[in-house]
Structures are given as structure tokens and as C-alpha cells.
Amino acid sequence: MDRFDLIVVGSGPAGRRGAIQAAKLGKRVLVIEQGKRVGGVSVHTGTIPSKTLRETALNLSGWRERGFYGRAYRVKQEISASDLRRRLLITLDHEVEVLEHQFARNRVHHIRGKASFVDPQTMQVVKDDGEVIHVTGASILLAVGTKPFRPDYMPFDGRTVLDSDELLEIEELPRSMVVIGAGVIGIEYATIFSALDTQVTLIDPKSTMLDFIDKEIVEDFIYQLRDRNMKLLLGQKAEKVTRQDGKVELLLDNGRHIVTDMVLFAAGRMGATDTLNLAAAGLEADNRGRLSVNPETFATNVPHIFAAGDVVGFPSLASTSMEQGRIAARVAVGAIAKEPPKYFPYGIYAVPEISTCGLTEEEVKERHIPYECGIARFRETSRGHIMGLDTGLLKMIFSLKTRRLLGVHIVGEGATELVHIGQAVLNLKGTVEYFVENTFNYPTLAEAYKIAGLDAWNRMGDIKSEL
């Protein structure tokens, strides 16, 4: 029986970052991955595929140029599912090659197979050929990620009624699509297919969406979706879904009938813990398959077993999962782990993008902090005119007492890149004067920071810190 300092189950962002961190500290590390190739959900069905699909759709459809050439403009007149898949496969191959090289360079052992606990320190691995091996670890990191939630009442067939993993395998682009679930995944895919001129209807039983995002940003986002004829049926629930004659019919709880070519069910994900035999290790998952951990060390209730990534719940981002895996691995092998900076960016790769960092206006109000906001619209920048942008909004919130930046919120082209300027100023406790007094490249979208900073500064006037 092989013994390792750290056994990592899963090779997604949390698993690979944790494994490499432990290996760099001179530890003997094993990664167990049940997929055909390393990378986990992030590489094969989640982050990388969805973002590649988005970029391909925007490029081939000519979406970014329609501000100049009209809504009918397209780079490729007939876009097929194979067009989308071609770029996807090239990207995935590159990601896997990079990851395999990282494992080899850092001498991380990895095997393919399904892992489950035999006891708190021993794991059984069933390989593809049926061979069963046992390995032990001084510490174990569970980074198994999630899988789509698939309720029994949905007639999934992988062709007309799909989950978010199956969507990447479609053979033909639908003329119409219903997306059930207005969470991050549902919104990303709904807006991507809308950009491909698919008629999209988004359904969610909640009357609001993206409640963790600043309300003003969500309102601007919703306006843009409705402006391009996406139907948003919020506060409505699909009670019955049936397939017939190559179409899908939905009956909503208000009596409304919808007929569509395809239904994407994207209402949540489950932690992929059901095959781990957690009970043998003294662990128990919640009703969504997620594990509870110490938020500072990512240790479970069993001291030498850790969990990181999507399997521990919000925020379920590849970026935060990587940091969670790194911290968990350092604690697991007895190294010091510094607490990460307070503020991290949240990115939603919809069309348009949304990215946010720090406090929302609603959170600032709840904390009774005197504040002022600064707004910039991308069309106010020269770069925005050059790019043909009619939409796009950058919002910053500042404390009236300290003049410090409290939050930055962006909707529009390049939001997930632009947000890092605000993130740096937030974590370095910068004030409104940074944006007013500094020079930004011209013409750039980043100039929106100066415009928003001046907007806030003008509104704040000469209010002094003694307030």
C-alpha cells in the first residue's frame, strides 16, 4: 500500500493548485482523477468550455461590431455547433497539456480512477480496467467539485432537454431555447445563445436574479437583455415539461404554455460526493452534497481531511477555488498559510460581462455607512466610441468619512478585466483621490475609472474626514 503526505481527490482548480503547492513544499503528493483527462469540471465542462464558447460565439456572430454595422452584421452567416466545438477542443487540449506538464515538473503523482474512503486515512481507487488499489495519506484534500442538479421530473434526453454539461455536446444550434434557472450558469448560457440569435426565454421561480450583485448593475443588465428581445419570466415556475414531435412544451404555474426547440435546466449543482463513502471517514454532506469546512483552514470536522472548491459552496469560482486549495494544502502539510486579501473579484461571463468587488450599495446602506457613488458609462470614453459601445457601466462607491473606495461594480465589455484596478485600490485602502489624480492610458475603457472617480469627487465636494 502506497503512502503519501497528501492525497488530493480531483484535479480541478482547487485540486491542482493544492497538489502543486504541497509538492513545492517537498511533500509526496498523489492526485486521483476519475475523468478521462486531468482538469476536472473547470477544464472539461465548466469554466474553460463555457468561456471558450462565449468567445467563439461573439467572434463568429460579429457581436462586438454590431454597434457600427447594425444588428444584422455577422462574421459567419451560418454558424454551426461544430464551429463552436472546433475552438473548444483546441482550447481543452492546451489546458490539459499545461496541467500535465505542471504535474510532471513538480513530481506530482496522478492516477485515473474512482476514489472512495475505506477508513479516515485509506482510500480505495478503482481504475478503468477494474484493478483496485489502496492508498493512504497523512492528509487528504477533497476537491471533487460539483455536477448538475437533475431532478426526476425533468425528462432529460441529452438532445432537447439538457443539463449544462450536456449542452456542450449539442449537434445543432436551436432556433429557440428555454433556460430554467437564472443563476450564474443559466444566465451565462442564455445570453451566449441569445448572441447567436437563438430566441431565448429565461425562467426562474424567484422574482429577482443575481441578488449578491449591486442592484443598479443588475437593473442595467436586465435592460440590455430585454432590449435584444430576451424574455425574462421571473417569479414563474415550470410545473410540467414534456417532449413531443421534436419539440418541448412547458406548462408554467400561471397557466402559460411555451413551446421551444430546446430546454436547458441550469437550476443548481450538487457536490460530487455521493461515491466517496464519506461515512467511512466520519464525514457527512448536506442535502446538496456539499461539505462544511473551517473557512480559514478548509479543514472538515475530521482534522486531517480538508475540502476546497465548489464542493464547499459559495462563491464557487475557479479563482477562489485555487486559493482555497492552496491554503488547504499548506495547512494540511503543516506550513503557514497567510489569510488572502479581504476583497476578491466576482466575474459573470454573460453577454454583457458583469464583475464586482467589494461592498454593494445595498450592503453599504445596511451598515449605515455615509457614502457617495460615482458612475461612468462606456459610451462616455473615447475607447468606447472606437469600439462602437452603446452600453456599459462602471460604478464606484466611496465612504464620505474616509473617502476610501468601498466597492466597484461593472457591467459591459471587458468587465472581468477592468475590475482588477478597483480590486487593487480596495485591498490597498485607496481613496477617491487615486482616481482623480492618476493618469490612465488614453484611449482605454479603464479611463472610465477616472470619469467615475471625478463624478463621485464632484458630488462629495469638500466633505472632510471629521464627518
Image (cartoon, rainbow, N blue to C red):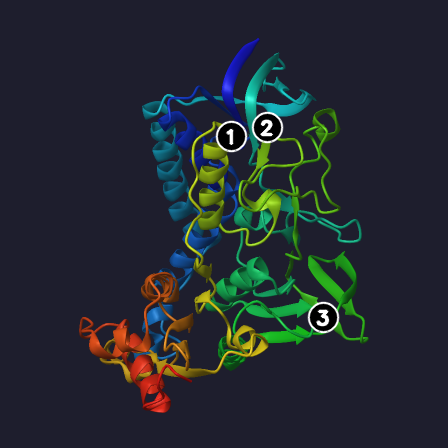
* The furthest residue to the top: 1
Callout 2–callout 1 Cβ contact below 8 Å:
yes
Query: What x and y, as percent, mark residue 196?
Result: 47, 65
Q: Where is mark 3, residue-wise? A: 258
Q: Where is mark 2, residue-wise? A: 304
Query: What x and y, as percent, mark residue 425?
Result: 33, 65
How many labels sit on residues? 3
For residue 253, above or below residue 304: below
Nearest the eye: 163 or 275: 275
Callout 1 amino acid: Ala
At 40% from the left and 77% from the top, the residue drawn is 398
Query: What x and y, as percent, mark residue 74?
Result: 36, 68
Check disc 2 and report its element: helix, strand or loop: loop
At 54% from the left and 43% from the top, the residue drawn is 309
Q: What's the mark number on residue 332? A: 1
At 62% from the left and 42% from the top, the residue drawn is 293
Q: On the rendered image, what quadrant is the N terminus found in?
A: top right
The mark closer to the camera, 3 or 2, is 2
Query: What x and y, as percent, mark residue 365?
Result: 55, 79
Left or right, 72 with respect to 145, comes to: left
